[in-house]
Image: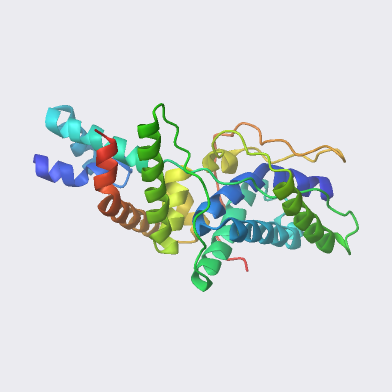
Amino acid sequence: MTSGFESVYGRYGRVIHAYVARLTGDPATAEDVCQETFLRYLAHERELAGRNGHLGPWLFRVATNLGIDRLRRIRPAALGAEPAEQATTAGDALQGRETGDRIRTEVGRLDPDLRAVFLLRAHHGLTFPQIGEVLDVPERTAKDRYRRARDLLMERLGRILGEDDR
Amino acid sequence: MTCDHVRERLLDRLDDLLDASEAAEVDVHVADCPPCAAEAERLGRLRARLATPWAVGPAPRLLAVRSSPARRLAGLVAAFAAGVLVAGLLFRAEPGPTRDLRDTLAAPPPSDLPPGVAPSPAAPPAPEFALTSPRRIR
């Protein structure tokens, strides 16, 4: 069991943590949710045995539920993650950093249900049927939530994104 | 389709939100309309910018899992706690971008590792992705 668990954590731990970190916007909460997700896996290990190809969706479903529950109970602390922007000039770096910060802030303002769909689609590349299965919603609902999240972000960020485009 | 009609749907087209027939109509129009094609490219750049993930800190390190079934849960909790502390003291930034979730979910199942061998990154993804019936686990 122990080596199997290590293998599962080695395979999914980083992705789960990154997803939850962006979902909750708080490093400490992300660590708590990540750890709780894998503790629940451990508690359900027997019934999950043999579901190798389906373990990822199960983990992300648990992580999403836990993360959204935490979001609804507490307001995340200031987003601590640094934007991943790279630039060649100080001016570009400043503008890129500011834009990245704004994007992160606005994603953090989204309702948790919309935020989860946006992250799964935009950052992790899941298809809408996949998102629907992870979040336990119909594909149509996943699409509608993504569209609402995207439209809100474009409305709030369209100008600053357009300035970067010049 | 008119240009206005198409431009209202460009983002949905880029995000794969249109059904097949509507997507085809948009594609046909864009292929023959330079202004709409330019707008599609501009929206594509904005969309890519919006979808760029920001960096996050490293995941907690798993240091040890006790083998005794009776104590493994408590042992795992302790290991996680120690891992978090160690990660804070011996911070090592994770190189590169986060692994694509689609790749991770589609990857072949992990194999058991010999004791003492640290877990390694997952193997390249398999082409298929399937899920069981969803169930809300609490």
Q: Nearer the viewer, residue B81 or B135?
A: B81
**Residue A61 locus on image (x, y percent):** 56, 58
The outermost residue toward the left is B2
The residue at 13%/28% (across/down) is B34
**Residue A151 locus on image (x, y percent):** 28, 53
The residue at 22%/41% (across/down) is B10
Judged left or right of residue B35, residue A120 is right
**Residue B102 locus on image (x, y percent):** 52, 41
Above/below status of B105 relative to B39: below
Residue B61 in view of the camera: no
Q: Quadrant of the C terminus of chain A?
A: top left
Above/below status of B137 relative to B96: below
Q: Nearer the viewer, residue B112 or B78?
A: B78
Kindly indicate the quadrant of the structure image that contains residue B35.
top left
The residue at 80%/57% (across/down) is B76
The outermost residue toward the right is B68
